[in-house]
Amino acid sequence: MKKHLNRAAVIVATLLMLALMLSFLSSLTMRKDAYVNSKPFYEHSDQYDILFFGTSHIRNGILPMELWTDFGYTAYNLGSSSATIPMSYWNIVNALDHSSPKLIVLDCCRLSYSGISSGTSYVHTMTDSMPLSVNKIRAAFDLGGNTSSALELICPFSVYHARWEELTREDFYPPLSVSHGATIGFNVAVPDRLARTEEGMVFTEEMPGVAYLEKVIELCRSRDITLLLTYLPYPATLEEVREANETARLAEKYGVDYINFLALDTIDLDTDMYDSFSHLNYSGAQKVSNYIGRYISQHYDIPDRRGDADFAWMEEDLSDYVDYLESSLESDAYLFNYLLLLRQYSTACTIYVAKDSPVYDNEVLLKLIENVSPEGKLELLREAARDKTDYLLFVNNVDGELQELAGSDIPDLLDTGMGTIGIESFPVIGCQVYDGLTGTNLGCDRGFAPGDDGIYIRTY
């Protein structure tokens, strides 16, 4: 008997070692998209009060760190590219193995999609970073479509085992997300206008999205978790607008709160899109995050965790987030993107536009200058553009200070709440950037001039 027990113990130990080895090899050789965005979630998964789910629309459109600075909410963005509602359901199920949020926000883009998943490759980007569990196995068999695909999702090493020659240092030490899962778009694209209609499409309970939305609602109610449905803004097609409109009727049927951003004027398509067809950039995500934060504060009892010693790690994460935003200013060479980045809440800046500048003839650039301050409405910029005169703007997004000057009123030295700063003029447009608290120059000062292709590029 003892001999048999010893042999069984050896077999169990061998299987455990094999499982650990395969787990390590899978995490090493897998592509790091899912790992980079989702892995930090598991470090403090039991301390998040709000979790976000949906497609890349929500991953690009909600900034958890901005919700922390503005409202004190602890949140994580678990959105996944091309996620169907069934995919989001299993994402929620697996997240709840590690977390007990007070609020779940689910974006309903693709609710009418006819399939269970968008394909195995997209499921990989959602599941590869999930710890192995019973629910991950259940998700794999439901979303995989067949046993072979399910096993591939459970053990990604079977797919990535041939990547040895591609491995780099970042595979061993991947740079994890500092934005609590959000993907921040530092680009400005001007899409076509948003479609409008009052009509909705017909939803049936046979649609996988509808059936799995019911599962999400039942799951949240069984766990005493509040559910908020959204449809984030983007230049949607007429059919997608109808999908969003019908979602409102479905939400009413189940007694669930719903925000249809396609019916609101939260964003400006001239300044707030990362690409011309789908995703919000940093500015658009700021605006949507602020709207959601205010909605949550007015409708739900989510605690403000700022100042709570148990959440001191959030301030450490915030420091990394600020460093990431500020470092992006050092490398971006395009004026459109640079003005977008100046909107970040931790900085102050001066923007100088020289008289007769061609900037004054570009409506998108004028809107981006107006967009630098989330709080203030500019009064002199349009007058300066009309009169073709010098223009100076000072904005401190930390305390909301805003000063505008034009023509001969522009001084050599400007007195601000953070001290006196020198004003330099540039051939076309120039920017000086400071830490909004200390007034320290961040070394990101830039001058810009138009290139042959009309794109404004950095001159120093």
Image: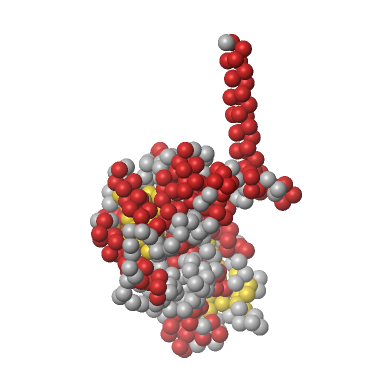
Residue drawn at x 52%, y 39% as measured from the top left: 132
Residue nearer the viewer, 191 or 286 = 191
- Count the labels in the image: 0
Residue nearer the viewer, 10 or 305 = 10
Colour mapping: secondary structure
Q: Position of residue 330 (x, y in %)?
A: 61, 62
Residue nearer the viewer, 15 or 414 = 15
Residue furthest out toward the top = 2
Residue drawn at x 35%, y 50% as measured from the top left: 215
Which quadrant of the view contains residue 230? bottom left
Residue furthest out toward the right = 165
Residue drawn at x 33%, y 59% as measured from the top left: 205
Q: Quarter of the image for the N terminus: give it.
A: top right
Residue drawn at x 58%, y 61% as measured from the top left: 328
Q: Position of residue 268 (x, y in %)?
A: 42, 73
* Up/down of 21 relative to 455, above or below: above
Q: Is residue 155 visible?
A: yes
Q: Quarter of the image for the C terminus: give it.
A: bottom right
Q: Is residue 260 left or right of residue 391?
A: left
* Up/down of 378 relative to 19, above or below: below
Q: Position of residue 38 (x, y in %)?
A: 51, 48
Residue nearer the viewer, 14 or 69 = 14
Residue furthest out toward the bottom = 387
Q: Position of residue 420 (x, y in %)?
A: 49, 65
* Up/down of 369 relative to 114, above or below: below
